[in-house]
C-alpha cells in the first residue's frame, strides 16, 4: 500500500532522514516512533508530498504521490489548527470539498462524522465555543472525511480523557476493518502495543528498530520485573539484583528464573499486608497487574505465558490488565545505538 524506499532528506549539511525504507500493508496500523528531532515529522511531510525527498521514492499503491493521489491521504498533525469563528459542521464540510467531494456529499458526511464523535448537538456552534477535547474531535473529523485510504495521525490521543481515547480507538478499529491503512506517530507506547501491528523507530534520521511490535518487545526487553510498591520489598528467590527506577524497583532476574515465579512470590508477600497497594509491571512477560488488595483478593498465579493471564478480585478489590514493555525495549535499543 505505502512503500518508502531509501528516502533521504538533507538541510544544508545536516541529514534529517537517512536512507529510510519500510512498507505499510493495506489495513495495517503501523507505528512511527522516535524521540523529538528524530526526523518523524520530516518523513511524514514527504509521505504527504509537502516536502520532496532528495533521493529515494515514496509510492502509494505503486504510484508516486501527486495532486491526484494526495486526496487519498489524510493527515492529522500534532499541532491542531481550526477556523475558530466558523461552525464545526462547516469546517468539516470545507475539508471534504478540499478533498474533491461535492458540497452536498461533504455536508452530509460532515453531519455523520460529527454524530459519530458525539458532537451532533455542537455541530452548529463556532469552534471557539468548543472545549479542547471537542475541538480535537472536530480535527479528527477533518481527517476522516472523504474516506482516505491512508490515515496519518500524529499524537492523536494527546490531551484526551479516557472516554474519548476509547472513542478514538473504536473509530480507528472501524476504519481499519473497512480497509484504511493507519500510520500512527505517538509517544504513548501502551497505545502502540494495543493498536499497532508493526513499528519503525528512527533516531537522528536513521532506522533503529523495525518489525512486528510483539517481536521487538520480545527481542529487546530485559529479563526483568518492574515493581511499584509502598511497602518494603522483600528478598525474593530468583532475583539477581534490585535497582531503583523512577520511583519503581527494577528486579533483574537470574537466567533460570521466570517472571511467573517472581510474580507468584510477590503476590504471596503482598497478601501479607492487606492495607498496602502493589503495581507490578512484567516487561519480560508483557503484562501488568494493577490492583488494590483486600483480605479476600485472589490473583491467579498460573500465568500461562502471561498472554492469557487474568486477575481475580473480591467484590471490594479492583484490578486490570494492560500491555507493557515497549518503552523499555525502545530505550534499550537507543542506548545500544542500534
Image: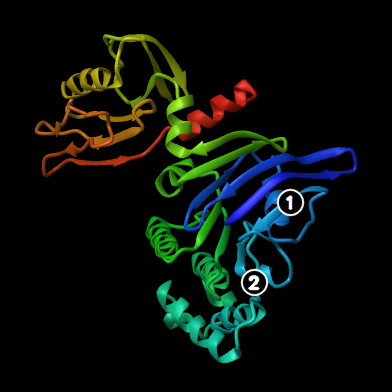
- Residue 139 drawn at (x, y percent): 56, 69
Pointers 1 and 2 in contact (CB under 8 A)?
Answer: no
Relative to 227, 175 lies left or right: right
Residue 246 shows in the view: no
Q: In the picture shown, does residue 43 fall above or below 111?
A: above
Query: Which is nearer the eye, 85 or 282?
Result: 282
Disc 1 to disc 2, C-alpha distance: 19 Å
Give the residue at x 62% y 77%: 95
SS under mark 2: helix
Residue farthest to the front? 62
Query: Which is nearer the eye, 39 or 89?
Result: 39
Circle nearer the viewer, 1 or 2: 1
**In the figure, residue 121 lies in which quadrant?**
bottom left
Relative to 4, 142 lies left or right: left
SS under mark 1: strand
Residue farthest to the left? 296
Residue farthest to the right? 12
Give the residue at x 59% y 75%: 128
Give the residue at x 31% y 16%: 233
- Residue 235 drawn at (x, y percent): 29, 9
- Residue 74 drawn at (x, y percent): 60, 66
**Mark 1 crowd level (few <14, some 14–19, many ≥20, 10 Å Cα):** some
Q: Which colour assignment does the render follow?
A: rainbow
Relative to 282, 148 lies left or right: right
Q: Mark 2 points at which residue?
A: 71
- Residue 115 drawn at (x, y percent): 42, 78
Query: Which quadrant, please, contains the N terminus?
Result: bottom right
Q: Mark 1 points at which residue?
A: 57
Q: Which of marks 1 and 2 is nearer the N terminus?
A: 1
**Mark 2 crowd level (few <14, some 14–19, many ≥20, 10 Å Cα):** some
Query: Which quadrant, please, contains the C terminus?
Result: top right
Amino acid at each position: 500500500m505505502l512503500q518508502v524506499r531509501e528516502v533521504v532528506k538533507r538541510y544544508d549539511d545536516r541529514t534529517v532522514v537517512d536512507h529510510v525504507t519500510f512498507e505499510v500493508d493495506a489495513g495495517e496500523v503501523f507505528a512511527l516512533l522516535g524521540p523529538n528531532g528524530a526526523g518523524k515529522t520530516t518523513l511524514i511531510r514527504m509521505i504527504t508530498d509537502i516536502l520532496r525527498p532528495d533521493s529515494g521514492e515514496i509510492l502509494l499503491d505503486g504510484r508516486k504521490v501527486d495532486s491526484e493521489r494526495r486526496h487519498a491521504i489524510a493527515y492529522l498533525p500534532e499541532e491542531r489548527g481550526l477556523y475558530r469563528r466558523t461552525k464545526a459542521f462547516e469546517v468539516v464540510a470545507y475539508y471534504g470539498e478540499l478533498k474533491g467531494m461535492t458540497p452536498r456529499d461533504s455536508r452530509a458526511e460532515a453531519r455523520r462524522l460529527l454524530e459519530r464523535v458525539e458532537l451532533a448537538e455542537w455541530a452548529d456552534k463556532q469552534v471557539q465555543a468548543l472545549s479542547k477535547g471537542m475541538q480535537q474531535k472536530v480535527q479528527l473529523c477533518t481527517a476522516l472525511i472523504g474516506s482516505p485510504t491512508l490515515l496519518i495521525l500524529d499524537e492523536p490521543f494527546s490531551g484526551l480523557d479516557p472516554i474519548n481515547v476509547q472513542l478514538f480507538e473504536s473509530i480507528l478499529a472501524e476504519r481499519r476493518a473497512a480497509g484504511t491503512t493507519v500510520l500512527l506517530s505517538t509517544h504513548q507506547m501502551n497505545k502502540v502495543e494495543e493498536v499497532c501491528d508493526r513499528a519503525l523507530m528512527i533516531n537522528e534520521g536513521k532506522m533503529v528498530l523495525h518489525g512486528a511490535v510483539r517481536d521487538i518487545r520480545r527481542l529487546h526487553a530485559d529479563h526483568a520485573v518492574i515493581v511499584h510498591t509502598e511497602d518494603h520489598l522483600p528478598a525474593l528467590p530468583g532475583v539477581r539484583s534490585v535497582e531503583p527506577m523512577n520511583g519503581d524497583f527494577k528486579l533483574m532476574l537470574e537466567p533460570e528464573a521466570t517472571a511467573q515465579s517472581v510474580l507468584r512470590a510477590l503476590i504471596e508477600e503482598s497478601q501479607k499486608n492487606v492495607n498496602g497497594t502493589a503495581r507490578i509491571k512484567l516487561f519480560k512477560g508483557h503484562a501488568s497487574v494493577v490492583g488494590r488488595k483486600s483480605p479476600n483478593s485472589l490473583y491467579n498465579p498460573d500465568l500461562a505465558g502471561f498472554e492469557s493471564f487474568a486477575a481475580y478480585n473480591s467484590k471490594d478489590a479492583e484490578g486490570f490488565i494492560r500491555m507493557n514493555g515497549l518503552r523499555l525495549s525502545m530505550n534499550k535499543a537507543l542506548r545500544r545505538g542500534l
